[in-house]
Image (cartoon, rainbow, N blue to C red):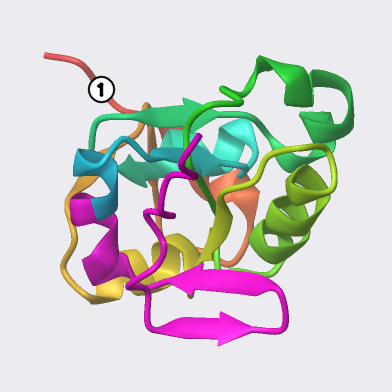
Amino acid sequence: MKKMESVFLECKLKIGQTIYVLPSEVPLLLGKGAVLVDIRSELETGIKAFGVENVVYLPYYELDEKWESLPLNRPLIFADAVGLHSKEAAEKMSGKGYHETASLSGGIADWEKEGMPMKAGKYQPLNGPCACMIRPHERK
């Protein structure tokens, strides 16, 4: 039986065993069947979210308990705020039998900076340095 080629084969950045996907590479990878796994907390995803299809929300702190809910037969791109925990998540899932894992380079911060599709969450950030400055959007 012929082994399928990795959808991450053309990704430009690899450090050690970890593949890093650039935000601009994600739409093509999603079109090839990859799934974006957003591992940010509910509060973070409630402020801003990735504006693409094929997103699974699984907070990093729940990954050890709920990892089996991720599709085993699909390439997974792990994403967080700036790319720190997504590398760990990709490596962890690779060790659990997920053969095609990658980390979104720069997380949602670089995603937004590069002008990739975004959608607002249910919370509206206000000016201020702490989470106490967040409130739900007013629905009209």
Q: Is residue 11 magenta?
A: yes
On the image, the x and y values in percent for residue 9 come to 39, 67
- Please give the name of the residue rendered at 17% of the width and 51% of the height, measured from the top-left corner: 117
- Badge 1 marks a residue whose secondary structure is loop
- Please give the name of the residue rendered at 59% of the width and 67% of the height, measured from the top-left corner: 129
Looking at the image, which is closer to me, 41 or 63? 63
- Residue 119 in the image: above or below residue 17: above
- Please give the name of the residue rendered at 49% of the width and 45% of the height, measured from the top-left corner: 3
Looking at the image, which is closer to me, 75 or 105? 75
When asked about the image quadrant of residue 71, the answer is top right
Looking at the image, which is closer to me, 58 or 30? 30
Q: Read off the magenta span.
A: 1-28
Quick one: label 1, few (<14), some, or many (20+) residues within 10 Å? few
- Please give the name of the residue rendered at 27% of the width and 43% of the height, measured from the top-left corner: 30
Query: In this figure, which residue is indicated by the disc labeled 1?
Result: 138
- Residue 16 in the image: above or below residue 134: below
User: Could you tell whether 28 is left or right of 110 in the image?
Assistant: left
On the image, the x and y values in percent for residue 94 come to 75, 49
Q: Residue furthest front?
A: 1
- Residue 8 in the image: above or below residue 135: below
Looking at the image, which is closer to me, 31 or 4? 4
What amino acid does circle 1 point to?
A: Glu
- In this rendering, does residue 33 appear at all? yes
